[in-house]
């Protein structure tokens, strides 16, 4: 006897299926962005900088805020400290569903110095990011509806999750989520141990979102890699069948690879960008938001690039209204 699926039963009853969920798990902190710095000052001196913004930061928070800019209702799971900054941080996330583990420590803070030419230097305190636990994440991850996506960010900054990160990804997948991952950069470098660890993560991924340097580094685990094309082939082979490898190319756009085929999208470079912090996080959100709407790979790459290009020129970012950038997800003619 053939059993009806839950979706077919909903259709027969005249009810619409629940929309897919967009959950984000990872680092939430306070960012102080300062610039522009022409060169390192002499130790013991003071330097005045013309621009600054204190705002919610961390890859997970950046992604959730980008989703709010696009008019989405993301679910953010992370942690905060136990101090006044934590309460301020919650105010910055108004309009976003949050489940944040309160940790008995100071709130993590990053100071981002923006240099002439677009380079950045970050100084980050340990703080509460040391304490986010897998049990908290799984307890607050809502049941997946068809097509739901969970984005994991910055595992190298979250030692409590990193200890069994592959198991956490596998459990999210078992619960019915498409698993998306932005690895970030390991502070200890791409050692053989890190390569082995990350490969166990990639086997659980439906969407791997990395930049060009991370792609080249991942691909060089066994021996030297010659060129991005070869690197893409090597990294794609580490993913589950049918998974999407997305390589962020900065101002040059993005590359998507699935089922042995690659597709490039060359977006228009945004002009007059002072603050590039969160560029990759903005792209991730635009790309995944489009995939939630069942967009093609080409349209999703375009949506990711448009989202980043719309957010980066804005300073301060807190002036972007909820839903103001929804046009970034519209199909382009």
Image (tube, grey):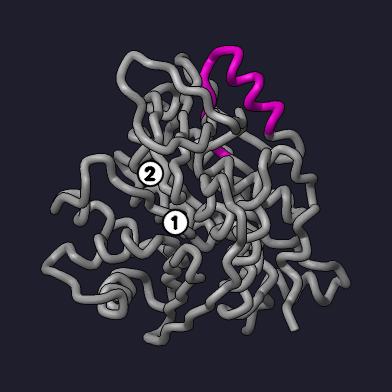
Quadrant where the image shows the N terminus: bottom right
Mark 1 and mark 2: Cα distance apart in space: 9 Å
Quadrant where the image shows the C terminus: bottom right
The residue that label 2 is drawn on is 155
Identify the image quadrant of residue 220.
bottom left
> Considering depth in this image, is 138 or 66 the residue closer to the camera?
66
> Considering depth in this image, is 150 or 213 the residue closer to the camera?
213
* Residue at image coords 60%, 71%: 268
315 up-or-down from 215: above or below? above
Q: Secondary structure at mark 1?
A: strand
* Residue at image coords 56%, 60%: 283
Residue 85 forms part of the magenta stretch = yes
Residue 104 spot, x, y in % from top left: 47, 14
**Which residues fall within the magenta stretch?**
77-92
Mark 1 vs mark 2: which is more N-terminal?
2
Disc 1 crowd rating (10 Å Cα; few below 14, some 14-19, many 20+) is many
The answer to whether mark 1 and mark 2 are in CB contact below 8 A is yes
The residue that label 1 is drawn on is 181
Residue 263 spot, x, y in % from top left: 47, 83
């Amino acid at each position: 006897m053939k059993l009806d699926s839950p979706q077919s039963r909903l259709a027969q009853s005249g009810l619409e299926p629940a929309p897919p969920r967009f959950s984000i798990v990872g680092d939430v902190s306070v960012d102080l962005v300062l610039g522009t710095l022409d060169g390192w000052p002499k130790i013991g001196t003071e330097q005045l900088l013309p621009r600054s913004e204190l705002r919610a930061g961390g890859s997970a928070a950046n992604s959730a805020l980008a989703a709010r800019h696009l008019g989405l209702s993301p679910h953010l799971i992370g942690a905060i400290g136990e101090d006044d900054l934590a309460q301020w941080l919650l105010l910055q996330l108004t309009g976003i569903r949050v489940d944040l583990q309160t940790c008995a420590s100071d709130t993590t803070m990053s100071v981002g110095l923006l240099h002439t030419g677009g380079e950045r230097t970050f100084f980050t305190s340990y703080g509460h990011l040391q304490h986010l636990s897998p049990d908290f994440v799984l307890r607050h991850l809502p049941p997946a509806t068809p097509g739901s996506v969970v984005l994991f960010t910055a595992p190298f900054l979250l030692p409590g999750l990193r200890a069994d990160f592959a198991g956490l990804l596998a459990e999210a997948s078992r619960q019915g989520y498409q698993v998306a991952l932005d690895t970030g950069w390991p502070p200890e470098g791409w050692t053989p141990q890190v390569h082995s660890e990350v490969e166990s993560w990639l086997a659980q991924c439906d969407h791997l979102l990395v930049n060009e340097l991370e792609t080249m580094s991942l691909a060089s685990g066994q021996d030297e890699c010659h060129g991005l094309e070869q690197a893409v082939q090597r990294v794609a082979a580490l993913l589950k069948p049918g998974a999407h490898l997305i390589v962020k190319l900065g101002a040059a756009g993005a590359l998507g690879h699935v089922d042995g085929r690659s597709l490039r999208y060359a977006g228009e470079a945004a002009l007059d960008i002072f603050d590039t912090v969160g560029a990759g996080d903005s792209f991730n959100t635009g790309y995944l938001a489009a995939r939630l709407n069942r967009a093609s790979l080409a349209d999703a790459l375009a949506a990711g690039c448009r989202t980043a290009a719309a957010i980066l020129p804005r300073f301060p970012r807190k002036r972007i209204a909820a839903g103001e950038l929804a046009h970034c997800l519209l199909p382009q003619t």
